[in-house]
């Protein structure tokens, strides 16, 4: 499988930030909207990738936009929530209200 510059760049940046670089996986797809990079990291490293108020993820997206402009492509980043993440353990508001049986 051929790696592209945007994919290699994302892997390098993310692996430099996380504690478990072996768990970092980047999937690249191309369609009429541009390039989509889907990032998977270990659940313990999600906070490092997202950052406070999403600032780190936004910075990574900005850098990817620059890499994309250099290569005449629109690059979008999607961060997959890992299985067993904090959000998957949270209940939705409807589930919580149903549990109250008011």
Image (cartoon, grey):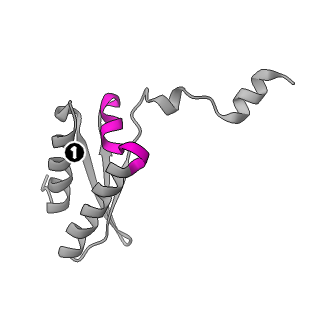
Say whether residue 101 is left or right of residue 73: right
- Between 80 and 45, the one nearer to me in the picture: 45
Considering every residue shown, the one lying at the far bottom of the view is 72
Residue drawn at (14%, 48%) of the image: 12
| Magenta stretch: dominant secondary structure | helix
Residue drawn at (38%, 71%) of the image: 33
Res. 25 image quadrant = top left
Q: Please state the horizontal and vertical placement of residue 61, each as a whole percent of the image.
A: 31, 59
Residue drawn at (17%, 35%) of the image: 21
Q: How many marks?
A: 1
**Relative to 4, is 15 above or below?**
above
Q: Which residue is mark 1?
A: 14
Say whether residue 85 is left or right of residue 35: right
Say whether residue 52 is left or right of residue 11: right
Considering every residue shown, the one lying at the far right of the view is 102
Callout 1: few (<14), some (14-19), or many (20+) C-alpha neighbours within 10 Å?
many
**Relative to 10, is 89 above or below?**
above
Q: Please state the horizontal and vertical placement of residue 97, each as a whole percent of the image.
A: 76, 29
Considering every residue shown, the one lying at the far top of the view is 100
Q: Please state the horizontal and vertical placement of residue 3, each as a whole percent of the image.
A: 13, 55
Q: Please state the horizontal and vertical placement of residue 41, each as a whole percent of the image.
A: 29, 37
Q: Secondary structure at mark 1?
A: helix
Q: Which residues are magenta?
A: 42-54
Residue 45 on the magenta span:
yes
Residue drawn at (87%, 24%) of the image: 102
Res. 58 image quadrant = bottom left
């Amino acid at each position: 499988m051929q790696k592209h510059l945007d994919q290699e760049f994302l892997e390098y940046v993310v692996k430099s930030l996380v504690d478990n670089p072996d768990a970092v996986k980047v999937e690249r797809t191309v369609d009429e909207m541009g390039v989509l990079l889907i990032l998977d990291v270990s659940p313990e490293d999600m906070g490092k990738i997202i950052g406070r108020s999403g600032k780190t993820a936004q910075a990574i997206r900005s850098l990817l936009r620059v890499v994309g402009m250099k290569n005449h492509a629109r690059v979008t980043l999607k961060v997959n929530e890992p299985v067993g993440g904090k959000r998957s353990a949270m209940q939705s508001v409807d589930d919580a209200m149903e549990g109250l049986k008011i």
